[in-house]
């Protein structure tokens, strides 16, 4: 039977974990992505100054950390993070606790999405801004981010739907949500009908999140009018 | 007069794994206030690198660039950003901010220099009116044509009231009509604001239309420099000849104007004067009338020739005649 309370809470918990962790992950991933762009140096080291070297080292280190975090399977990260989560949230179970590993898993992913979005900005426009005497900060705030906005929004739609997928695994640490319901009822108790309902609800939620992101991107893109 | 831009022994070498590439070598250049200065060369000659060295978008490997006596190499990055506000720049691909309206694009450099939003908008409106786009304030670049985009770019480049405008192949992406309109606008700005303009191009016709002086750059060096008239009439270097004569060697139309009488006052009959003119100037000549005779090995008499409609080819021929000391005069309405 369709249990409104069960699924209602499931949806709310899923959305809470998804949106909460996406928001926090962006607070980390966005600056990280920008930093990856800003510290990128020409490959050729012949004319390097000290500043070039410092930037290059930062770039390589950040890139490495990002890749390492992205290569850890989320289920393992979830378990591995338990002591750290307990330290931050006070407990390792529940939806709020699940947000911690979700953020750690999503932030590097978001950083790479942001990096690739910003890379799409026309080099000529950046050069024009430099010719007008724009500082690096001004180029980031007034050129890179606004010009990359549509692409960043598409990236965020991808991020939020991927994170929604991650939240399904939060059931392992008692995080709740639709994924948790699917595993507990559908898998452990062989209640296929409940499994199917969670599946359909998940599909609908992902569709909505994706569609909202794409529409926002389209509205905000002044290149096609 | 003191030069507004002074470039001394400028060199730029790009270092790469496959070896060093010398883009510029020992460039010396003086550009004076109010000039329209052309820098022309075939692609790969180094002209784009040169213009980027003028505002230090590319840092030269050697030599100095002085703007109004200020050595750009000695500035901190902050001071350099301020110095750049005195130099507008426009590009082949316009490089407008695609997510900003025409008006906001023009406001952009003003925002960078900390002008209040209200004042920036006022100034931007003024500028868009000067470039003839007062009906496109709210349009996004994607809604504008190439010529209109370049006009927005010009307005934007002038927002901070610079004394210098650098144009990097600014008309190369435009069709001929729009190119002419854009060049006319640049000329107007040059005259009305006493704006010093540096035009980088590979098209001789652009230089011919607007420039006062021109430098021809070939293989990282300036191989020839001088007034546009001189270089067109009498190109000396190989590169200059290639650029000047390259244009339309065939199909130069004639009309009934442009007739000149040349006088043979006793030079050797054995000198093939007309053939030499044609070969030297690479331009056709139409013989309308001839009455010459050979007196003791000397040519005496006159000939009416018609020069091609194309102004530069005609200038070149007249210059050649002058050089060879062959007297000539214009014949009006020769029938």
Image (cartoon, coloured by chain):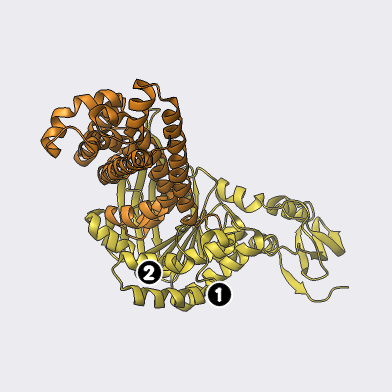
In the figure, the shade used to draw chain B is yellow
Q: Tell me what residue is drawn at x 46 percent, y 45 percent.
A: A208
In the rendered view, would you say B18 is above or below B37?
A: above
Residue B312 relative to residue B225: left or right: right
Other residues around mark 1 within 10 Å, as few (<14) / some (14–19) / many (≥20): few
Residue B234 in view: no
Q: Nearer the viewer, residue B193 or A66?
A: A66
Q: How far separated are the C-alphas under marks 2 and 1? A: 25 Å
Residue A164 relative to residue B136: left or right: left
**Chain letter behind tag 2:** B
Q: What x and y, as percent, mark residue B323?
A: 63, 61
In the figure, the shade used to draw chain A is orange
Label placed on residue B162: 2
- Tell me the mark number nearer the camera, choosing from 2 and 1: 1
Q: What x and y, as percent, mark residue A114?
A: 36, 42
In the rendered view, would you say B7 is above or below A9?
A: below
Residue B325 relative to residue B60: left or right: right
**Residue bearing the label numbered 1:** B135
Q: Nearer the viewer, residue A46 or B106?
A: B106
**Chain letter behind tag 1:** B
Picture quadrant where residue A20 is located: top left
Q: What x and y, as percent, mark residue A91?
A: 14, 35
């Amino acid at each position: 039977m369709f249990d409104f309370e069960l699924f209602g809470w499931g949806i709310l918990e899923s959305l809470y974990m998804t949106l909460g962790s996406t928001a926090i992950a962006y607070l980390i991933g966005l600056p990280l992505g920008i930093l990856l762009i800003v510290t990128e140096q020409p490959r050729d080291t012949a004319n390097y100054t000290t500043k070039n070297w410092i930037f290059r080292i930062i770039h390589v280190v950040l890139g490495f950390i990002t890749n390492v975090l992205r290569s850890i399977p989320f289920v393992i990260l979830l378990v591995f993070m338990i002591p750290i989560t307990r330290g931050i949230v006070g407990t390792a179970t529940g939806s709020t606790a699940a947000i911690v590993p979700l953020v750690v898993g999503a932030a590097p992913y978001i950083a790479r999405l942001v990096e690739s979005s910003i890379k799409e900005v026309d080099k000529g426009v950046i050069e024009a801004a430099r010719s007008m005497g724009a500082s690096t900060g001004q180029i980031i705030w007034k050129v890179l981010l606004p010009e990359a906005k549509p692409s960043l929004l598409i990236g965020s739609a991808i991020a939020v739907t991927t994170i929604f997928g991650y939240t399904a695994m939060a059931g392992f640490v008692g995080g709740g949500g639709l994924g948790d319901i699917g595993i507990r009822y559908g898998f452990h108790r062989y209640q296929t009908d409940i499994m199917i309902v969670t599946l359909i609800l998940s599909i609908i939620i992902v569709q909505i999140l994706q569609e909202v992101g794409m529409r926002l991107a389209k509205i905000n893109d002044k290149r096609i009018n | 007069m003191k030069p507004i831009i002074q470039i001394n022994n400028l060199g730029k070498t790009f270092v790469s794994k496959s070896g060093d590439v010398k883009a510029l070598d020992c460039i010396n250049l003086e550009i004076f206030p109010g000039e329209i200065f052309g820098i022309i060369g075939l692609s790969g000659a180094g002209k784009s690198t040169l213009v980027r060295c003028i505002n230090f978008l590319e840092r030269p490997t050697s030599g100095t660039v002085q703007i109004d006596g200020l050595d750009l190499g000695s500035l901190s990055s902050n001071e350099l950003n301020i110095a750049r506000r005195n130099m507008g720049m426009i590009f082949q691909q316009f490089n407008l901010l695609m997510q900003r309206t025409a008006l906001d694009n023009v406001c952009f450099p003003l925002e960078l220099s900390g002008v209040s939003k209200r004042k920036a908008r006022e100034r931007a409106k003024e500028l868009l009116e000067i470039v003839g786009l007062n009906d496109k304030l709210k349009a996004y670049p994607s809604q504008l044509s190439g010529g209109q985009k370049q006009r927005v770019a010009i307005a934007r480049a002038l927002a901070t009231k610079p004394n210098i405008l650098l144009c990097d192949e600014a008309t190369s992406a435009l069709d001929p009509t729009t190119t002419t309109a854009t060049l006319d606008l640049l000329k107007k700005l040059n005259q009305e604001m006493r704006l010093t303009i540096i035009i980088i191009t590979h098209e001789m016709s652009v230089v011919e239309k607007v420039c006062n002086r021109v430098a021809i750059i070939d293989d990282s060096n300036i191989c020839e420099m001088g007034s546009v008239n001189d270089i067109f009439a009498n190109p000396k270097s190989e590169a200059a000849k290639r650029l000047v004569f390259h244009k339309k060697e065939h199909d130069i139309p004639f009309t009934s104007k442009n007739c000149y009488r040349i006088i043979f006052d006793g030079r050797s009959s054995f000198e093939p004067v007309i053939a030499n003119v044609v070969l030297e100037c690479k331009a056709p000549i139409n013989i309308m009338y001839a009455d010459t005779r050979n007196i003791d090995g000397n040519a005496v008499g006159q000939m009416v020739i018609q020069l091609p409609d194309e102004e530069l080819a005609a200038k070149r021929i007249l210059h050649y005649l002058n050089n060879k000391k062959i007297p000539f005069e214009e014949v009006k309405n020769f029938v």
